[in-house]
Amino acid sequence: MFPEFSFDPPAEAARAETMSPEEERQYQELLSRLLKPEERDRVTHLLLERLKERKPQMEHNKEWERHTRPMLEAFTHAKFMVEMAVRYADLPEPPVTMPSGWAALLYLYDLR
């Protein structure tokens, strides 16, 4: 059902046949941004070091819910609304029996 997936880049010949010059340029640019294993290891260790250094400073951890919960709730609501907009975008007309997602979308735009 799903095509086979691999993290390995496609073979040069196969890629050349399927990519336009613009896609090839974008692909090469993407490859140029990848970190070499040594650099990735260095950055990973640096990240861990910085996290350990700053652990005693993060006051937000003591009041995690007060600081973080509003951001997570806002993200979750925005994600839900985008999903509902995508789900109902192809309706030929507003539904008679109102699905809860459609009702939420109307409420977002103050139409309910």
Image: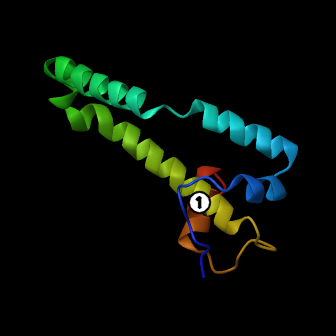
Residue 56 point in image, percent of width and height = 13, 19
Whether residue 112 is visible here, answered yes or no, is no
Q: Is residue 82 above or below residue 46?
A: below
Quadrant placement of the N terminus: bottom right
- Which residue is at the front of the view, 22 or 75? 22
Q: Is residue 44 left or right of residue 51?
A: right
Quadrant placement of the C terminus: bottom right
Under circle 1, the secondary element is helix
Q: Is residue 54 left or right of residue 92?
A: left
Residue 39 visible to the viewer = yes
Residue type marked 1: Glu
**Residue hosting label 1:** 83
Q: Can you give x and y, in whole percent of width and height, for residue 42 in the image? A: 34, 25
The crowding category of the residue bearing disc 1, from other C-alpha atoms within 10 Å (few below 14, some 14 to 19, many at least 20), is some
24 lies left or right of 71: right
Residue sitting at x 69%, y 79%:
96
92 lies above or below 45: below
x and y percent of residue 31 in the render? 62, 38
